[in-house]
Image (cartoon, rainbow, N blue to C red):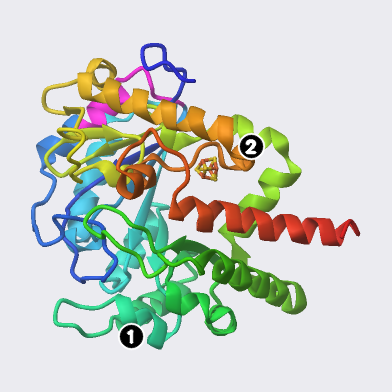
């Protein structure tokens, strides 16, 4: 169990909330302040980078993820300036890769040029063909966003800029593995990550909260794996790749559980609040803890987080939850204790084990991949 006072972990990912605002209004969105048009100020950006780059948690490489709102609403010029500040603060010998996770509706040629020039990575949130995507990914006036997101995707493809797609699986999409598969193949989408519709933040229920979801998820995954095996498209699915890797390579567990270990993920909110563990905690509220802001870049160094009393309580509860998983769950060696945010939002406490999220996104995936590995080895 990691000790907060002697953390051996390095920051891998700095999540920066340039704005909490989102220009669309997905039905499953967890962000409580997505109507706020606040922008992270130049001073806050500078303090955030200075705090991270002067901290003892800095390694040789840092991923900066612009997220927790729709990052593209801040505009290209905002990020040109932000990247200049980052370069000014960055020590030599440290490499930084920036990632943008976006709904794609605001992508323009200027954005594509900026992403290419800055070697940034980009992920698009697209939930499949129009009838699936537009059920949940809507504008504030209730219109679907599929056409605009696909225009963004086409622009990336026209410019040969690699990207991945995140698809949120809902009750409806679990019934449509063939439709999703054909959509990815027809649109030459080559890297996909499946997120399940989670109970998270202000999204307090999920279409997947049914007794039958585990079976439906497994059927979806089996069919998708069959299609991949039969058709062999240029398409990789994060969940399958991750489970195969974890099953055939037990040493992958040495990587640990970044969302359950202090300071591996550091999140900085629009006003400079600092959080760690699951990025979704930043800005969300809980009746159990006063706040998940364990400091603020304008007042605190990152090491101060480790002595913050709320951080200590949260860390202790998270580690109790991980220990409970270790003691009780046969999937622990590949899951490593799940995601603290899901435990809190679903069970009301970090010091718990199973969640809907882990049943669908961990256990079902491992079961289906293990079945396939055993079948391929002639063991079943
Ligand atoms: S699958 Fe669920 S119960 Fe098992 S280790 Fe992971 S989070 Fe814990």
- Label 2 sits on residue: 333
Does mark 2's beta carbon lie closer than 8 Å to ligand 1?
no
Image: 191 above or below 10: below
In the displayed structure, 93 sits above or below 244; it is above
Q: Of callouts 1 and 2, which one flags the residue occurring earlier in the amino acid sequence?
A: 1
Regarding mark 1 in the picture, which secondary structure is present there?
helix
- The question of residue 51 being in magenta is answered with yes
Q: Where's residue 283, x and y in %?
A: 18, 44
Relative placement, left or right, of 137 versus 291 is: right
> What residue does disc 1 label?
147
Task: Give coordinates of residue 339: x percent, y percent.
Answer: 43, 43
Q: Position of 318 compared to 281: left or right?
A: right
Q: Which corner quadrant holds the C terminus?
A: bottom right
Res 235 quadrant in image: bottom right
Q: Nearer the viewer, residue 15 or 96?
A: 15
- In front: label 1 or label 2: 2
Measuring 71% from the left and 36% from the top, which residue is drawn there?
250
- Residue 37, percent from left and from top: 8, 58
């Amino acid at each position: 169990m990691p000790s907060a006072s002697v953390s051996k972990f390095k920051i891998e990912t700095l999540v920066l909330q340039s704005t909490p605002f989102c220009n669309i209004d997905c039905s499953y969105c967890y962000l409580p302040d997505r109507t706020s048009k606040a922008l992270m100020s130049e001073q806050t950006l500078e303090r955030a980078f200075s705090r991270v780059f002067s901290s003892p948690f800095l390694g040789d490489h840092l991923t900066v993820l612009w997220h927790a709102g729709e990052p593209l609403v801040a505009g290209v010029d905002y990020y040109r300036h932000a990247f200049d500040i980052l370069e000014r603060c960055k020590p030599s010998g440290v490499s930084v890769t920036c990632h943008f996770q976006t709904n794609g509706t605001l992508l323009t040629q200027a954005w594509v040029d900026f992403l290419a020039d800055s070697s940034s990575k980009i992920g698009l949130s697209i939930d499949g063909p129009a009838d699936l995507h537009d059920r949940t990914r809507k504008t504030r006036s209730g219109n679907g966003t599929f056409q605009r997101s696909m225009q963004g995707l086409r622009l990336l493809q026209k410019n040969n800029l690699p990207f991945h797609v995140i698809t949120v699986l809902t009750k409806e999409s679990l019934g449509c593995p063939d439709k999703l598969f054909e959509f990815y193949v027809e649109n030459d989408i080559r890297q996909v990550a499946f997120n399940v519709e989670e109970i998270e933040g202000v999204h307090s229920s999920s279409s997947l909260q049914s007794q039958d979801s585990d079976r439906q998820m497994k059927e979806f995954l089996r069919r998708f794996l069959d299609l991949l095996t039969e058709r062999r498209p240029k398409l990789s699915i994060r969940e399958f790749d991750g489970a195969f890797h974890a099953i055939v390579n037990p040493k992958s567990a040495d990587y640990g559980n970044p969302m359950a270990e202090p300071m591996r993920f550091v999140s900085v909110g629009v006003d400079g609040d600092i959080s760690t563990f699951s990025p979704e905690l930043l800005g969300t509220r809980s009746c159990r803890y006063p706040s998940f802001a364990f400091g603020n870049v304008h007042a605190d160094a990152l090491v101060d987080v480790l002595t913050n009393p709320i951080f200590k309580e949260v860390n202790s509860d998270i580690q109790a939850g991980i220990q409970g998983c270790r003691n009780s769950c046969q999937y622990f060696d590949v899951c490593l204790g799940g995601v603290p945010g899901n435990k809190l939002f679903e069970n009301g406490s970090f010091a718990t084990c199973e969640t809907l999220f882990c049943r669908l996104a961990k256990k079902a995936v491992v079961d289906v991949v293990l079945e396939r590995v055993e079948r391929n080895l002639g063991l079943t």
